[in-house]
Image (cartoon, rainbow, N blue to C red):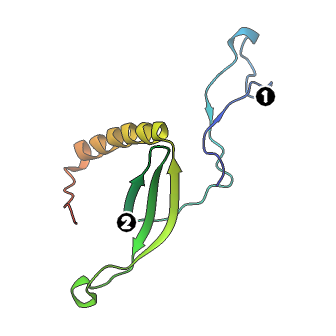
Amino acid sequence: MAKSEVQAQPNAGANAGVDAGEARQGVQWIDDRMATQFANVVNVQGTREQIDLFFGTNRTWNVAESGGMSVELSNRLILTPLAAKRLWTVLGGVLREHENRYGALNVEQQG
């Protein structure tokens, strides 16, 4: 998968109308190779060096009849612990805003 976050490099086109001493800095989101996939199941595991996020889709129609769940895994995202902490912080803010607008999300602990 392509890098989703890249430091923007000053160039004439992006900085037209900006003084030479005031070159814009920031993030340039390059999405031309990005893929979108649906997931309704997520699992996480971690070690000292990395945090692994597993995404998939529940393929079970009736858990009572089948005796368990069948999950088709589609993606594994490997993050450094620092990137995982940033994701946790940003995702927490997005979910707080979602719940303020639409109501609380109740997540049952399954285990």
Q: Which residue type does callout 2 highlight?
A: Val
- Between 70 and 107, the residue placed more toward the observer is 70
From the top left corner, tell me how far across and down residue 79 is, in percent: 51, 46
- Between 104 and 15, the residue placed more toward the observer is 104
Q: Is residue 83 left or right of residue 69?
A: right
Count numbered badges in the picture: 2
**Badge 2: how crowded within 10 Å, few (<14), some, or many (20+)?**
few
Which image quadrant is residue 9 in? top right
Q: Which residue type does callout 1 highlight?
A: Gly
Q: Residue at position x 52%, y 52% from top?
A: 78
From the top left corner, tell me how far across and down residue 77 is, in percent: 51, 55
The tag earlier along the polypeptide, 2 or 1, is: 1
Q: Kindly report the distance in space between the C-alpha atoms of the residues bearing marks 2 and 1.
A: 43 Å
Taking the view exactly as shown, the residue that stands out farthest to the front is: 48
Q: Is residue 90 left or right of residue 17?
A: left
Taking the view exactly as shown, the residue that stands out farthest to the bottom is: 65
From the top left corner, tell me how far across and down residue 83 is, in percent: 48, 39
Q: Which residue is mark 1?
A: 13
